[in-house]
Image (cartoon, rainbow, N blue to C red):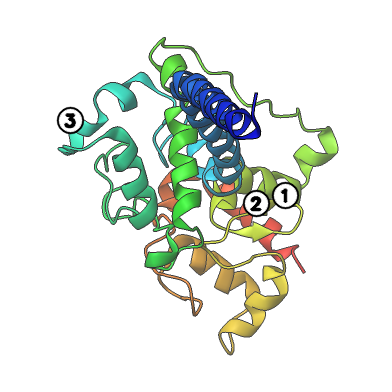
Amino acid sequence: MSRFNLEIFLGVFLVSVTTVILLIYGFNEEDRMAQEVERQQGRAIEVGAGLFENNCSGCHGLKGEGITGLCPPLNDGEFFTNRMKEVGWSGSLEDYIISVVASGRAASTRPDEYAGQGNPAMPAWSDKFGGPLREDQIDSIAQFVLNWESTALEDVVLEELATPTPSPEEEADPVARGQRVYLDTGCGGCHTIDGLSAGTVGPNQSTIGTVAATRIPGMSAEDYILESILDPSAFLVEGYPDNVMPKNYDELLTTEEISDLLAFFLSLQ
């Protein structure tokens, strides 16, 4: 075989091999794309789980079970089957979740059940509206919530969050009791306390027992904190929006619980 014919043969052979490889690649492309979509969705759910725990679980519960009188459940069949119809949403559930998380909700659609008449339903979480989260992070939270659909529609009874039984010493300590009130009522969903919660839409409360005494001249830390619990609009910290904190804690909490919560905040020096 001449050199010229050999080059032609090799050229035809290489073209044929390349064509076969491309055909095989093309046949498998649909499966590969599906696997990549599944991989990306799994990663988004994983990221969303962490974001939900840090930013949303304080109000909606770690497993999306909601908090009575404060925020509704999301891991719930009613949410997946009837919520869009209830609010008149014509798009997809994913778009609805992203929209509500991003821009918040000024008023509750169920004021008799959650947050109370006239109280804010949910703050805006998107950095476009003054919140702390990027668009991709909100998308990940939506994927995490949507991931509950299969269990929610099976009407699975959600496990109650395990709450350690307090010791007699803790039960007798108003500061310890107040910390439980702080956690149980979802305060950590909006506020940071070092080592306890990581909320960002409300002021950092890690040293509120000291800081509160400096906020209003002539007002004690105790009076400032108590007034802020009962009337969240009374004293606004610069950089944080009004209408984020529920204004009916006098209805949600007993006098003793408010007193314990106050004792806990005053202990944060």
The amino acid type, in three-letter code, at marker 2 is Asp
Q: CB atoms at circles 2 and 1 under 8 Å apart?
A: yes
Query: In which quadrant is the N terminus drawn?
Result: top right
The amino acid type, in three-letter code, at marker 3 is Lys
Instruction: Confirm whether residue 115 shows in the render.
Output: no
Per the rendering, the mark at residue 260 is 2
Asked which secondary structure carries label 1, the reply is helix
Asked which secondary structure carries label 3, the reply is helix
Asked which secondary structure carries label 2, the reply is helix
Residue 268: x and y in percent read 74, 64
Report which residue position mark 3 lands on. 85
Report which residue position mark 1 lands on. 174
Residue 163: x and y in percent read 69, 29
Q: Earlier in the sequence, mark 1 or mark 3?
A: 3
CA gap, disc 3 and disc 2:
41 Å
Mark 3 neighbour density, 10 Å: few (under 14) some (14–19) many (20 or more): few
